Amino acid sequence: MKRVTGIGGIFFSARDPVALRAWYQQHLGIEVQDWGGTAFSWCDAAGNPTKGTTVWSIGAAADECFAPSRSSFMINYRVDDLAAVLQSLRAEGCDVLDKTDDSDYGKFGWVMDPEGNKVELWQPPPGQ
């Protein structure tokens, strides 16, 4: 079973998310949208658009979405079969969080790595 198929998103928390977003926009040219991030569209080697995006976002440090991690970042990895990956991780003794989410954006689950970082696993909806 193939597990991770790519990176779906990178999420940061910041003491001053507005200022940090502005820094990234000014100095690195990342077009930050009103929701606090951007979605990079994928393309092939010739520059032709392909299906898929990678989200990049900065939120407030006070937000609890990374809990129980104390890290200031979380990486979202794409998977083809979330239930199977979570089952395998549990069988291997990994710290898989009980909560999962199923929404219009796809299916989400979480595991803690050995350093205490929360890792998000995402099964995109069909066609993405």
Image: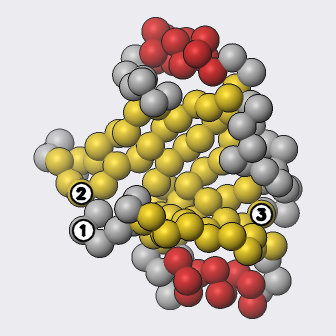
Say which of 9 and 46 sits in front.
9
Residue 5 in sight from this viewpoint: no
Res 41 → quadrant: top left
Spatial CA span between label 1 and label 3: 28 Å
Q: Residue at x 62, y 70 (%)?
A: 100
Q: Amino acid at mark 2?
A: Lys
Q: Nearer the viewer, mark 1 or mark 2?
A: 1
Give coordinates of residue 126: x percent, y percent. 29, 72
> For numbered disc 1, what is the local secondary structure?
loop
Q: Residue 3, labelled with which disc?
A: none
Q: Is residue 118 above or below residue 29?
A: below
Q: If you read the primary sequence from the N terminus, does the residue marked by circle 2 or circle 3 appear first?
A: 2
- Neighbour tally class for label 1: few under 14, some 14-19, many 20 plus, Cα within 10 Å: few
Q: Residue at x 78, y 62 (%)?
A: 113
Quadrant housing the C terminus: bottom left
Give coordinates of residue 125: x percent, y percent. 35, 68
Q: How is the image coloured?
A: secondary structure
Residue 65 in sight from this viewpoint: yes
Q: Is residue 29 above or below residue 102?
A: above
Q: Residue 112, labelled with which disc?
A: 3
Indicate left or right for 11 with 14 as reference.
Answer: left
> For numbered disc 3, what is the local secondary structure?
strand
Indicate left or right for 51 with 114 as reference.
Answer: left
Say which of 60 and 42 sits in front.
60
Provide the residue designation for mark 1. 127
Q: Amino acid at mark 3?
A: Met
Give coordinates of residue 65: x percent, y percent. 69, 47
Provide the residue designation for mark 2. 51
Q: Is residue 67 above or below residue 15?
A: below
